[in-house]
Image: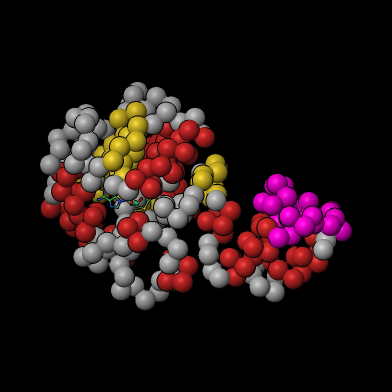
Amino acid sequence: MNIATWLDKAKTKVPSIDAELILLNILREKDRTYLISHDTRDLTEVEEEKANYYLNERAKNKPLAYILGSKEFYGRDFYVDENVLIPRPETEDIIDVVKAIVTKNRFENPVIYDVGTGSGCIAVTLKLEIPNAKIVAIDNSDGALNVAKKNSDENHADIILQKSDLLSDATDNNIDIVVANLPYVNKAWDWLDFESLQYEPLSALYASNDGLALIYELINEVSARPDVKHLVLESDPSQHEKIIEYCKKKGLELVETRNFILYFVSL
Ligand SMILES: C[S@@+](CC[C@H](N)C(=O)[O-])C[C@H]1O[C@@H](n2cnc3c(N)ncnc32)[C@H](O)[C@@H]1O
């Protein structure tokens, strides 16, 4: 079967873009125009079998990132599997907010903790964007830490990986910035697409207390530490008001809201 015929068949089962990305991955090509300029090229038996397998998985709603084992974050490719949350575009704002904090405060060698690192996308990106920073990536899941290690090795990002429940085992007593994209999904949200979320680790998605339990716990830890001055959190915008209120009570003042991201300083 040639490329054009396979794509025509695949597009009846999944969105066109997914069918094209599956084929590009298998053919190890990056540019979609390849599929047009080579539309009469025959797929080998192995290529076709693999393409059909990926197509059937995608038709069952498995996220493409898990099928292909890769997701782009801040312009770089990260390995992902079902041990970790698939990096989301809204999380990229954390990188820009932290870069701005480092510049504004003239930090030369900032110590930055990424709590709930998952694939390590935030920690690895911060290390590559701010090479002088010391980056510690924390997670309480061994599976996630293995994925973060693979991503730090593949990207040559020299970060420290640590198993810990939030900051409880943090060894530094001079942390400058804490960033966290912790689980914040409230199971009661009726607009969630549970069919596609079913593939992602429950422990990376959901939190009790309307999705706020872990965020509140981290705020408690940060507010009890005199060293941490800057806290950058991701959460759903519908939760922002409550988080801002909670932080205020704990001596943390809101500096900036950027889409899903909240940036606080301790008073
Ligand atoms: C929403 S995912 C975020 C992953 C990654 N930072 C990202 O932005 O794509 C949350 C991560 O927090 C971790 N986690 C959940 N509870 C934790 C806890 N108490 N302490 C440390 N990590 C935790 C999960 O294992 C998961 O990898």
Whether residue 88 sits left or right of residue 21 in the image: it is left
Q: Is residue 232 shown to the viewer in this render? A: no
Specify whether residue 186 is painted magenta.
no
Is 75 or 9 nearer to us in this picture?
9
Whether residue 189 sits left or right of residue 241 in the image: it is right
Which residue corresponds to the image point at 30% horizontal and 30% vertical from the top-left?
111
- The chosen color scheme is secondary structure
Q: Residue furthest bottom?
A: 190
Residue 161 lies, with reference to residue 13, above or below; the image says above
Which residue corresponds to the image point at 49% horizontal and 49% vertical from the top-left?
80
| Stretch in magenta | 23-49
Place residue 229 in its image quadrant: top left
> Percent position (x, y) of residue 141?
32, 48
Q: Which image quadrant: the C terminus?
A: top left
Is 156 or 212 nearer to us in this picture?
156
Which residue corresponds to the image point at 18% horizontal and 52% vertical from the top-left?
217
How many discs appear? 0
> Percent position (x, y) of residue 247?
19, 52
Place residue 216 in its image quadrant: bottom left
Whether residue 192 sits left or right of residue 32 in the image: it is left
Which residue corresponds to the image point at 35% horizontal and 32% vertical from the top-left?
160
Specify whether residue 26 is painted magenta.
yes
Q: Is residue 112 shown to the viewer in this render? A: yes
Residue 35 lies, with reference to residue 119, above or below; the image says below
> Percent position (x, y) of residue 122?
41, 42
